Each structure stands twice: as C-alpha cells, then as structure tokens.
Image (spheres, rainbow, N blue to C red):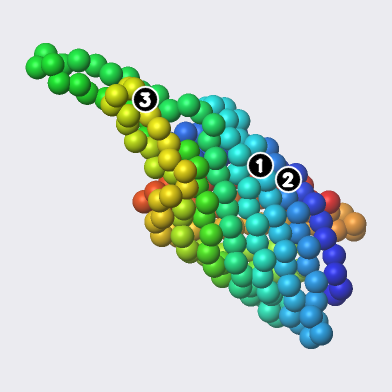
Amino acid sequence: MGDYGNVGINAGYARFGVNDYGKVGIDGTIKGDFSNINNGYKLSGNASALIGNGHGVNAGAYAGVEFGKLNCTQFNLGVMADYTQAFKDPKLKIASQPNEQISYSTDLDPKKSLKTGLELGFSRNICCDDDRRFSLSLMGGADIHSQARINTEKNTIENTKLNKVDPFIGTRAEYAKKVNDKGQELYFSGKCFLSDGSSYGEAGIGFRF
C-alpha cells in the first residue's frame, strides 16, 4: 500500500466547559507500511481556532500502529494528546447581602486543558468498499488542567498553570467517503472528552485532499 499523506480542512461546532464556539481547522495524516504490509503506522495532527463566545484554540496529535490493513476492518492502538485553551476573561460579580456577607457569581471553568493517554479503535470499510469508511476510537488517560480560584483581596479570578490532574475518558468517530478518483474525501467527524476537571466536545464536516 505504501506511504502516503493527506491534509484536510474542516468547520463545525465545539464546546469547552460551558462555552460554545464555532470552529475552523486543518488536519493532516501520514500513513505507511511495515515489512508486513498488513500492518503499518499512522501519524496525525490537527489544529482549530475556536470562535464565538470569546475565542480559543484546540490542537491534537496521535501516533500509533494499525493492524489488518488489507482486511475490511482494521484496528489501531496508539498514544494521543489534545490541548485546549480558552482566551475569554473569567467573570467575577460581587454582591453585598443584607447581613453584610459577600456572595460571588463566578466563571470558574478551567481555561486550559491538556489531555494525554492511550487510544484504541477500529476502522471499517463499509461493505468492504474502500470508498466508504467508518472509524471509532476510545481514549483514556490524564487530564492536566488549570484551576480557577477567587482572590478575595483583589476581587479577581486567577487561573493557575496546568497543575491539576484528573482522569478522563473520550471517544472519536468519523465517517469518510471518497468523492473522486484522486482519493479526495468528504468526511463528518466528532470527538468528546469528559473528566471532573474539564470537558471538550466538537462535531464538524470537512474535505480531505
């Protein structure tokens, strides 16, 4: 099958914490064979701009091996990383109560998150047709994120560096269909990460060259 690569552009919807965004991005993939061409490797990366409620960025990388490349169903195992940062300033409102206590209405969602761990999944050529493919992966590992806290002396919210760690689980799915004999693809994709520290999800449509 040989070595090959492709680049895609995409757009869609993303949600980080409690904030909604539009997203535009690009992704790239390099694949190749080992000495046994039924097995191979895959390297991929992506980067997106988050636009809307404030703004932000999301980027990810994956490196792994694929098994059964000559079959209708292939399996993959690898390591992944996914980074998200929101640039919207957190909000802090202070209200005095009749008993002179202070109450805070705050935006304490993490503003940065780095998720890293293992990814296990499969790809299926639908009806053994190379022109239509569905992929699904499960992920798990560590969510390293910032932690927001109130500075009562300055009446501000301060976000720490990436110093809080929680476990996370996630999933990624894609349906791709070749649209011409050049191998170019139209694809629909989505991914979701959940943890006690932060959450991220997105859905989009793209075109791969």
Q: Position of residue 64 (x, y in %)?
A: 66, 70
Q: Are marks 3 and 2 in contact (CB under 8 Å)?
A: no
Q: Position of residue 145 (x, y in %)?
A: 45, 48
Question: Mark 2 sits on what residue?
Answer: 26
Of the numbered discs 1 and 3, the one sitting upstream in the chain is 1
Q: What is the secondary structure assignment of the residue under circle 3?
A: strand
Residue at 90%, 57% (x, y): give it: 182
Q: Is residue 202 visible?
A: no
Of the numbered discs 3 and 2, the one sitting upstream in the chain is 2
Q: Nearer the viewer, mark 1 or mark 3?
A: 3
Question: Mark 1 sits on what residue?
Answer: 48
Amino acid at the residue labelled 1: Ser
Q: How many marks?
A: 3
- Given residues 117 and 162, the one toward you in this image is 162
Vertical placement of residue 142 versus 64, above or below: above
Residue at 54%, 31% (x, y): give it: 87
Q: Is residue 116 visible?
A: yes
Q: Are marks 2 and 1 in contact (CB under 8 Å)?
A: yes
Mark drawn on residue 156: 3
Q: What is the secondary structure assignment of the residue under circle 1?
A: strand
- Given residues 161 and 205, the one toward you in this image is 161
Amino acid at the residue labelled 2: Ile
Q: Position of residue 99 (x, y in %)?
A: 9, 17
Q: Position of residue 114 (x, y in %)?
A: 52, 51
